[in-house]
Image (tube, rainbow, N blue to C red):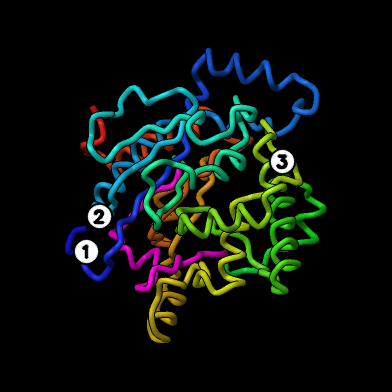
Amino acid sequence: MTETANKYNFPIDIVYLWVDGNDPEWRAKRNRYMNIGEFAGQGRVEARWIDNQELRYSLRSVEMYAPWIRRIFIVTDNQCPAWLNRNHPKIQIVDHSEILPSEALPNYNSTAIESCIYRIEGLSEHFLFSNDDMLLSAPVTPATFFTADGRPIIRLNGSRFNRRKALRRGDNYSMMLRHMQDKVATMCDRKIHFAPHHNIDAYRRSDFAHCIEIADQAWTQTTLHRFRHDNDMHRSFMSYYALATGRGVLRKVGRYNGVEGVREHLKSWLQGCYHSDSRCIPVQCPDYDAVFRKYNPLMFCMNDGEGTTDDDRRRMVEFLNRKFPDKSTFEL
């Protein structure tokens, strides 16, 4: 650990999920399963699999702002980014076959794959989880993600999750969140009313394993779903359960949550410039720089979606290349 982490005597790793959805062989294999029985029509949002090389820039942000990270695990389906330096001592590629049961393979359900990341051989007890489109934009320390006694700091959106609106909307992610909130409320007699902040999250491996154990049948069923189902278990269960049982510490994310003191809050409000722990930015947003000037986020997610165009993706890559112009040692 570096001086940045000298108050923390435990290592911290980071885990990414990554897929190259542009690979014709991978697409052909996926498409075969998309048209089989119960999997037809489930979780077929193409943007989930498009690779815009966000991982390249996310790793650049980690090297710039979190050099204390011990190891970086990249979970893939028999793939590897062509630009990645696999010989870097911090980098390890983890194939789905190493953590998922054979009967669940091949698997295109990110919630199922995420549920198995705690099985990664050599993963530290304290770890971060990130999608490839999540990045840091300022220096962070272990204290950003864990308390001194090792509990994860759990970031949830400060505004309450509108359960009725989510039910009317009926999207898969909202349905899973409702399911997780209800399940934790039943098990722990405490309902968490907020949604995850959709950015880099902190976990303990032992907590993760415990949550799998106490709802083993439901997690097993999720793992066997090759594509997303509305009744899938979701890793937000780990965060909600940690909060309900004192294993984690809540930090609500909002536009002011990084601002200290009444005077600074007033100043931010008057100037219309805030400081937030994280911000989820739709890739189709017309002005990324304006979002940063307004919210000054500590971490951010470039969220690709169904309405995103190829021109939007091109603009995003140009923006990320301006923000992180220098190659990291993780690149060839």
Identify the mark at residue 68; answer none if there is no mark: 2
Asked if residue 186 is positioned above or below residue 231 in the image, the reply reads below
Residue at the far bottom in the pictured view: 262
Q: Residues within 10 Å of mark 1 (few under 14, many from 20)?
A: some
Find out whether the residues at labels 2 and 1 contact each other: C-beta distance under 8 Å. Answer: yes
Q: Nearer the viewer, residue 136 or 77?
A: 77
Residue 57 image position (x, y, % from top left): 34, 39
Q: Residue under circle 3?
A: 221
Q: Which residues are magenta?
A: 133-156
Q: Residue under circle 1?
A: 4
Q: Report, in whole angstroms, how far the alpha carbon at label 3 lies from the one at label 2.
A: 36 Å
Q: Report, in whole angstroms, how far the alpha carbon at label 2 lies from the one at label 1.
A: 7 Å
Residue 84 image position (x, y, % from top left): 30, 28
Residue for point 54% across, 18% down? 26
Q: Which label sits in the foreground, 3 or 2?
A: 3
Between discs 3 and 2, the one toward the N terminus: 2
Q: Nearer the viewer, residue 164 or 114?
A: 114
